[in-house]
Amino acid sequence: MNPRRSVVLAAAASAVLIVLSGCTLFPSTPVGRPGATNAPAGLEEAYGQSLAWHDCADGMQCTTVKAPVNWDAPADGTIDLAVVRHKATGTSLGSLLVNPGGPGGSGFDFVSQGLSYAVSSTVADNYDVVGWDPRGVGQSTPVTCYTDPIATDKTLYGTFADAYDTQGWLDELTVEEKAFAAACEKNTGELLAHVDSVSTAKDMDLIRALLGDAKLNYLGYSYGTFLGTVYAELFPQNVGRLVLDGALDPKLSALDELKVQMAGFDGAFRAYMAYCLQQPECPFTGSVDEALAQARGVLDTVDAKRLVNSDGRVLDSATLGTAIGENLYSQDYWPDETSMFNALRQGDPSEVFINADYYNSRNPDGSYSGNSFEVYTAVNCLDGDFVDDPRSTLDGIAEIDATAPILGKYFAYDDYAVLDTACNNWPVPKATLPTVFDAAGAAPILVIGTTNDPATPLAWAQSLASQLSSGVLITHKGEGHTAYNQGNTCVDDAVDNYFVKGTVPASDPMC
């Protein structure tokens, strides 16, 4: 869940320079540069560019990769990809590309600010750990929609004259999403049509080649697993050691994926409630089912109360749903869930907004860190099948509510409904993605799923591992979103042994 120069203007400026000076779009490369060999036909310039590394934060190295804005027309112009590298502290086995998920998560920040969270010390000893901001994200050439955070606030937190689940509300939402889509088109330009996952997977192969690696070693979390899956399908011969943690099922439709995900959050909320009822400060009482009904009652009635935060924002059930979901990503956040409900019972919405703001990357001063919301919408509109789904938005919400009857529709108001409305009014067509995901001929790929992961349910990891011709499933018995490098020795050892020694479990270790 920053004012920058338009990609169109940047591309136009590049074109002028080419005409005037005869220069190429990509930095020149000395003969023998690893990336210059075995480049896909027509992409020799991109794969042959040189990288200028410089020292940056905490002893790491940073560089910028030039990638075609449109991989099908590489002469049309380039975008920048921000890349950071932590060199192996021991003997390097090569590079390991890391993505934290999203879509919209910053891999650059993930590595530069959270290396010890991203990978184990064993992996950091043996690999040059590389993070990058995917196209459209953060420090790479960005997707830009609204440049005024007040406008973004209206999109993320605005309330409506009509009640949720009504045609009047949907009409209001449509007006808002049409304006948002128009701003994205105006301020992003040509790139908006090319932030799909296939384009990003091609960027990943370019980065692999420029780093001098014959094969891609990759660790992807959450949505990052989909990038790894697409990469493996497009470039099976280039697959090195891939780990996909918190896996997505690439075969699901957008609505079916969201239905399963919302049911996962319901399951996680049930687990939270069992924990809460054992705590003296829990605001709920009775059995787990009785407590869940009480929580649903809070969601059902909060709109009518119109609780006002200190900054003037009015709390509604969609924002409360977002805040609840934020605290279900990890058991470590469950005490925050309890504190939030206790404050809300006293008529104080401040903790709800604090948690929703964290989910939306909103800072206390009202600014936003990065552009994750914009990228999330743009990528889903290109990758998803919203425009092909004949079901109405209201029918989709009803299906989600039936599948996830505790939290589902309240999550859907600010997620499914926004995406369905935005994508059906998106100014560029959806992308063409692979229809098969077997990655035939690829080396073994580890797929990790957690039994009660709220965001990426275990069934998705099971499905992906079965679709991949070389998929190897690791099941983590536990709570929370993703499993590697979070204290489970069984999972950590399996992944580290795979990355360092190339060994895979003979069967699912059921960690």
Image: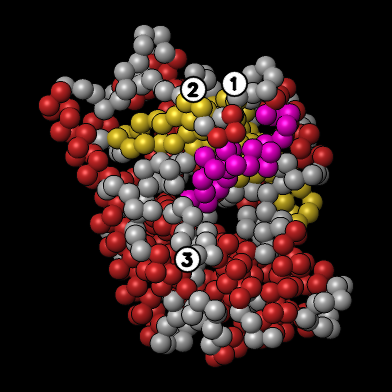
Labelled disc at residue 94: 1
Q: CA distance from mark 3 to mark 2?
A: 38 Å
Judge whether 197 appears above or below 233 on screen: below
Asked whether residue 375 is drawn in magenta, I would say: no
Labelled disc at residue 366: 3
Q: Quadrant of residue 24?
A: top left
Judge whether 484 appears above or below 97 on screen: below
- Disc 2 residue type (three-letter): Leu
**Residue 281: horizontal and vertical position, in percent?**
82, 77
| For residue 16, side relative to residue 222 (left or right) | left
Give the camera-side residue of 57 and 315: 57
Image: magenta residue range: 100-124
- The residue positioned 42% from the left and 13% from the top of the image is 33
> Which residue position holds label 2?
211
**Residue 502: horizontal and vertical position, in percent?**
70, 24
**Residue 43: horizontal and vertical position, in percent?**
32, 24
- Disc 1 residue type (three-letter): Gly
| Residue 398 seen anywhere in this rendered image of the structure | no
Judge whether 52 appears above or below 473 on screen: above
- Disc 3 residue type (three-letter): Gly
- The residue positioned 31% from the left and 18% from the top of the image is 28
Give the camera-side residue of 29 and 388: 29
Q: CA distance from mark 1 to mark 2?
A: 9 Å
| Helix, strand or loop at mark 1 | loop
- Tag 1 and tag 2, C-beta contact below 8 Å: yes
